[in-house]
Image (tube, rainbow, N blue to C red):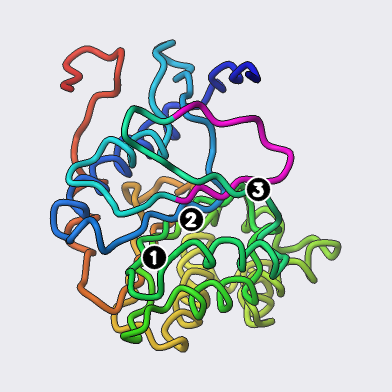
Amino acid sequence: MQKQPDPQPVSKAVCHKLECLGDFLAVYSAGIKGGQYYYLELFAGQETYTCKETGVTVPGLSRRALKVKPGFGGYILVKPGNSPEPARAGAGDNPLTIRGNLIQSATLRRIFDRIPRSSSIFCVIDPPGYRRLRWTTMKKLITSGTNWQGQRMDLMLLLPVEMAIIKNLNRPECAASLTRFFGTTAWQETNSGLVSGRISTPKARDMLVEIYTSGLKSLGYRHVESLNPVKPGHAPLYYIIWASDGESRLKQIKNIWGKTRFLPGEMFHQQ
């Protein structure tokens, strides 16, 4: 048996994100017929992490997903081919781990060969950057994840706006990969305005998110919603994007991410 990797140290912001995602999963799973839904996590990370500020080990997203009740009909975790082995699931759970590059069509086929066409899908995407997630991949993912009734997958995307996109907008060597990410050159106009001083950085963030959400709307989603999860005046590491043919979740997302919370290891934290 291969030894499991030590928990990766992560920032308080990442620990907060995991707590919020766990709360959202609990709310989401409570409102669905679990056996009819599959849980699909792209760029799945480690099973546990260590919060740098507190030194406490916290569960990763996949472990949180496996613990929600009533749970999902199946679990698929997609990891890069060179990622460490995931920890074993709890008793009674049977998550399938698929390793591969999402840019390759063969990896997508392996995913959807395991999901019945009669099932609905909840997909969460938390990419480590923008280079590994191309717009062509997103289109194939959403098309392949449409069930036999024509319902597209419920999608929660954590768009890495600040560190992965804003800082690379004006780098010529990143232009081609940014166009592949957005599926359009519209981001160049935003960059031009940012460089010339015609638009502010907060405005540029909103414009880039709008480019991406417009693309999702063009695929036919009934609801496409976005949220900057931090208070005004602060730079968000990511924006939350929700896309669904079912129902709006913006109010729930706002309530969960806007909640005052104390992390594990901090005074006043509640289980």
The reply to whether the C-beta atoms of the residues labelled 1 and 2 are less than 8 Å apart is yes
Whether 77 is among the magenta residues is yes
Question: In the rendered view, does 3 fall on the left or right side of 44?
Answer: right
- Say which of 50 and 196 sits in front: 50
What x and y, as percent, mark residue 92? 31, 34
Q: Amino acid at mark 1?
A: Leu
What x and y, as percent, mark residue 60? 43, 32
Q: Which mark is residue 125?
A: 2
Along the polypeptide, which appears first: circle 1 or circle 3?
3
The reply to whether the C-beta atoms of the residues labelled 1 and 3 are less than 8 Å apart is no
**Residue bearing the label numbered 1:** 155
Up the image or down, 149 lies above or below 29; here it is: below
Q: Can residue 196 be seen in the rendering of this structure?
A: no
| Front tag of 3 and 2 | 3
- Say which of 76 and 225 sits in front: 76
Q: Quadrant of the N terminus?
A: top right
Along the polypeptide, which appears first: circle 3 or circle 2?
3
Separation of marks 1 and 3 at Cα, in angstroms: 20 Å
Q: Amino acid at mark 2?
A: Ile
- For the point 19% across and 41% down, the residue is 259
Q: Which mark is residue 99?
A: 3
What x and y, as percent, mark residue 198? 58, 74
Q: Which residues lie in the magenta part? A: 76-88
What x and y, as percent, mark residue 250? 23, 64
Along the polypeptide, which appears first: circle 1 or circle 2?
2
Quarter residue 113 falls in: bottom right
Magenta span: helix, strand or loop, mainly? Answer: loop
- Say which of 22 and 34 sits in front: 34
The reply to whether the C-beta atoms of the residues labelled 3 and 2 are less than 8 Å apart is no
Separation of marks 1 and 2 at Cα, in angstroms: 8 Å
Separation of marks 3 and 2 at Cα, in angstroms: 15 Å
SS class, disc 1 = strand
